[in-house]
Each structure stands twice: as structure tokens, then as C-alpha cells.
Image (tube, helix red, strand yellow):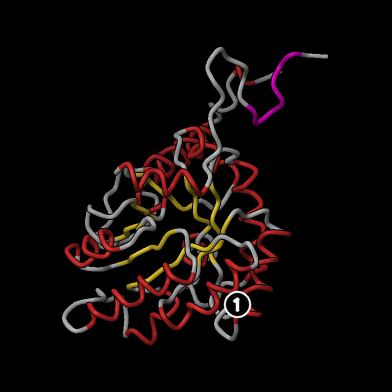
Amino acid sequence: MSDAPVYGSSPQTDQAPRKVTRLPHLAQWKAEGHKWPMLTAYDYSTARIFDDAQIPVLLVGDSAANVVYGYDTTVPISIDELLPLVRAVVRGAPHALVVADLPFGSYEVSPQQALESSIRFFKEGSAHAVKLEGGERIAPQIAALTAAGIPVMGHIGFTPQSVNTLGGYRVQGRGAGADQLIADAIAVQEAGAFAVVMEMVPAELAAQITRKLTIPTVGIGAGHETDAQVLVWQDMAGYTHGRTAKFVKRYGQVGDELSRAARTYAAEVAEGTFPAPEHCY
């Protein structure tokens, strides 16, 4: 039998094997003041790249509605559309903690509905945790899931699934709304969530909540004092079209490079210069 590694695994080295990210690691990192990154992922190949880059937590977000399926909002996406993406990411990132978003309409009705939806992500998608949006109003669902042994990441502040109710993409927690956001964060923690995302929240308020909570906070447009940061990978890598939110920093121009490669390939095919002799059998 060949000693070559199975495709997708790492070759044997003298170094200690990389650890798989577990929930206790996130709590430990908060206690130590160690900040960690989270990115979205929606397919096997990208997940492999992020796993190799040692991104410890990957989110199969309902943002797939926008960047994968082309919907205008996250509202239309379904469990059946997300499940294949979750399976692919889990296979591509063996060291990452993979969190699956519960899409709109899959958990709001009752704790029982949330439980049934989450079970599908675990049994059919092999997810390690689920994320759902909302604070105090969703605390019963979070409590039911954690009681059943399902790890939950909360999401407060701007919640994209409620974009129509919130009147568009607006910063949350300003003025009188600050007290409600603090109450939401505490409710999510007390219900048993292992972490909470805060989206489009004033930096000072996010810092206050981070100090108040014992669970890690994950910021997206919430300043630099949260315990972790998350971005949609297409935004982070410069793969999206048009304007991006203020909180996005582009760390690459993947879209431009892919366009250049496609145009060069098309030109060489038209010119008859591809395939060249070295590409032929």
C-alpha cells in the first residue's frame, strides 16, 4: 500500500498534528485576550484554503443567498439550499469549527421548530454548531437547542433577516437602543449560547458588551474590541461587485484576477495558442 496521503489530508511531518477547533478553545481565547478570525465559506475548495490558512471558525452563512444564489436579501434562502454548502465546507475544513446559519423561517415559530431545523444541519450537514438571529425574543429557542446538546452562536444588532422590519441596513444600538442591545446580549448568554455576533453596532457599545459578557463576542462592523471578527469572504478578498459596507476591508482583488485569467484564457483559445505543445499528450 502506498504511503502517500489520501487526497485532502496533510502529508506526515515531524510536527505535532494541528488541533481541531473546539468550543472550549473559544472560551480559553477570550480568557487569554487572544483575538481570532472567522470567515464565511460555502464550498469545499474555498474551505480548504481557509483551513490551510488556519482560520479556526467558518460560517456557512445565509449570506449565501446573496453571494451564491444571487438573491437580493438573505430572506429567501432555505435549509435545502444551505445543506449542500455545509456538507462541502465540513469536508474541506477538517480543523475548523463549522457553524451553520439557520435561515429565515426555520426557527422563529417555536423552540420545537428551531430544534427540528438544527437537527437537520447536524444529521444531514455534519455542522458543529448553528447560528440564529435575535436577542430576548429568541432566547427560548437558544435555551431549547442548548438543552438538547446543540451549540448555538447568537447574532444581535443588525440582523439581516429582519432587514424589512429594521428599515434597511442601519446601525443598531444608538441612543435608547443601547439598553435593549445590552439586554439582548445578556439574554443570549443566559440562554446558553457559546458566542454572539454583533453586527453594525457602535464600537463603544460593542466594547462595553464584550467586557460584560463571559462568552466571546464576534464583531462585524462593531469596532476592534470584540473578541473576534467575521467577514463575508467575498467582501474580504475583493470578489464582490459594487460597493461594500463601511466595515469591510479588502485584503485582495480576487475578482479582478479571476476576470484577467478568464479573459486571457478566452483570448488564447481564440488565437489558437492554447493548448500549447506542453499541454498536449
In this rendering, the count of numbered labels is 1
Q: Is residue 8 magenta?
A: yes
Position in image of residue 280 (x %, y %):
67, 20
Q: From where the camera sits, is residue 115 visible?
A: yes
Residue at image location 54% in from the left, 73% down from the top: 143
Image quarter hosting the N terminus: top right
Q: Is residue 70 visible?
A: no
Asked if the stretch drawn in magenta spans residue 5, the answer is yes
Measuring from the top left, give residue 98's x and y in whole percent. Answer: 55, 51
Q: Secondary structure at mark 1?
A: loop
Q: Which residue does the image show at 28% across and 55% down from the upper left?
A: 226
Give the image location of residue 126, x and y in percent: 67, 53
Task: Choose between 103 and 246: the one closer to the eye.
Answer: 103
In the image, taking residue 91 as reference, residue 23 lies left or right, namely left
Residue stretch rendered in magenta on the structure: 3-9
Main SS of the magenta segment? Answer: loop
Image side of residue 7 versus residue 17, left or right: right
The residue tagged 1 is 106
Task: Bin the neighbour count of mark 1 within 10 Å (Cα to Cα): few under 14, some 14-19, many 20 and up.
Answer: some
Q: Position of residue 275 (x, y in %)?
A: 60, 26
Task: Tell me the quarter of the picture where residue 129 sits.
Answer: bottom right
267 vs 122, nearest the viewer: 122
- As shown in the figure, which amino acid type bears the numbered disc 1? Ser
At horizontal 35% and vertical 71% (from top left) the residue drawn is 185
- Quadrant assignment for the C terminus: top right
Q: Nearer the viewer, residue 166 or 188?
A: 188
Q: Is residue 99 above or below residue 48?
A: below
